[in-house]
Image (cartoon, rainbow, N blue to C red):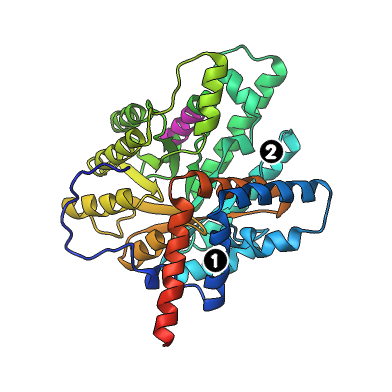
Amino acid sequence: MQTTETLPTTSTSLSFEDTSIAFSAKSDWELKKTYWLFSIMNQNWLVKVGTSLIKTAFSLRLPITWVVKQTIFEQFCGGESIEDCQKTIDKLHQYGIGTILDYSVEGEKNEASFEATTQEILRTIEKAAQQPNSIPFCVFKVTGIAPFNLLEKIQAQQPLNPDEETAWQKVKQRVNTLCQTAYQKNVRIFMDAEESWIQKTIDSLAYDMMRLYNKEKAIVYNTYQFYCHATLQNYKQAIEMAQKEGFWLGAKLVRGAYMEKERKRAKEKGYSDPIQPNKISTDTDFDEALHWSISHLDHVAICAGTHNEYSSKLLTQLMQKKGISPNDKRVFFAQLLGMSDHISYNLAKAGYNVAKYVPYGPVKAVMPYLFRRAEENTSVAGQASREYLLVKAEVKRRKMQVK
């Protein structure tokens, strides 16, 4: 449930109900495939069975890659390589929507894979530099280029042995290489949020990078997950710190992605649950952060990563109230590829800065990401139903139009 605060009146009409705009990029065939996929994802038991079968098939090395690639992979991913993503990049750009290339290979745990991931992210930065109007941001996860247990140990303030100290220096060097290259190429870069027991370490890395590269404008963006009850206060303190120290705070605002894992760990280890008591509290803090951001745009740049209609509408109207142009580069909206097109395409049509996260990587390697999307669409209240009903409405509208 979202807060019932009254939204400011708008001078322009912006509706997320216009499915003709939301699905304007889809052919009739593509729309029918999307309808079929979300009709399946709307059934919780089918998602669980399907996920289990796919995992088993991959473990047995059965030839199912083509099936996955033509269905869930096609819906939520841009391709297996940066080059494969070009078609998606061009199509989104045609409708005024940017691309955030997201190398979504997970579970890498050795120095060679960390270096390979760093090189791949550098390639996304180069791609963005070549197509600045189409690719407004790049992104990386620190755990993609660093050992998780090392980040955990640093946050717990445990002493490092010589090998760990060497590994930590390499991590900092990789982070700096990515952010320095982004700065030199004039490409904005997100550092994604992760679990709370390593997040302070990531925050510290992000702020060090901002001090170096955000003196003229926001290049490096940290990510704030508002499902943690401490995040709003941390965000306000970060804004104050940026103002005091004279750098731009880049902030990607999201609700969050690790709630169940967070609660389970807190219970197992006997510490206070860091998660908000309910969804209303998360919504309230997220929307308060939007208010706070718009009030501090003299040294803050934000990207609202949300699939929430109320929050998206609220941000547009806060901008109008403050006289901020829809295409002001200090404010972006972002959604995941394959989800919430009714928000993305209608915002873009109204002139706002919008970008889609476009994950890519080998099919088998991005399956953990795809499983989360499937599970998210069944666990988030109304998400799959909303997507399904919107696609269904557009299918019906087109049929009526033909008659």
Q: Which residue is mark 1?
A: 34
Distance from Cα at disc 2 to Cα at disc 1: 29 Å
Please check the rendered image and state whether residue 14 is part of the magenta-colored stretch, yes or no: no
Q: Main secondary structure of the magenta part?
A: helix
| Label 1 crowd bin: few (<14), some (14–19), many (20+), radius 10 Å | many
Q: Picture coordinates of residue 7 (x, y %)? A: 19, 50
| Three-letter code for the amino acid on which mark 2 is drawn | Gly
| Three-letter code for the amino acid on which mark 1 is drawn | Thr
Q: Picture coordinates of residue 242 (x, y %)? A: 33, 32
| Label 2 crowd bin: few (<14), some (14–19), many (20+), radius 10 Å | few
Say left or right for 199 vs 7. Answer: right
Q: Which residue is mark 2?
A: 107
Please check the rendered image and state whether residue 208 is part of the magenta-colored stretch, yes or no: yes
* SS assignment at label 1: helix
Along the line of sight, the residue nearer the viewer: 392 or 11: 392
Q: Residue at x 55, y 72 (%)?
A: 32
Q: Earlier in the sequence, mark 2 or mark 1?
A: 1
Q: Picture coordinates of residue 153 (x, y %)? A: 60, 18
Q: Is residue 46 above or below residue 348?
A: above
Say left or right for 290 vs 363. Answer: left
Q: Which residues are magenta?
A: 202-211
Along the line of sight, the residue nearer the viewer: 23 or 378: 378
Say left or right for 48 vs 156. Answer: right
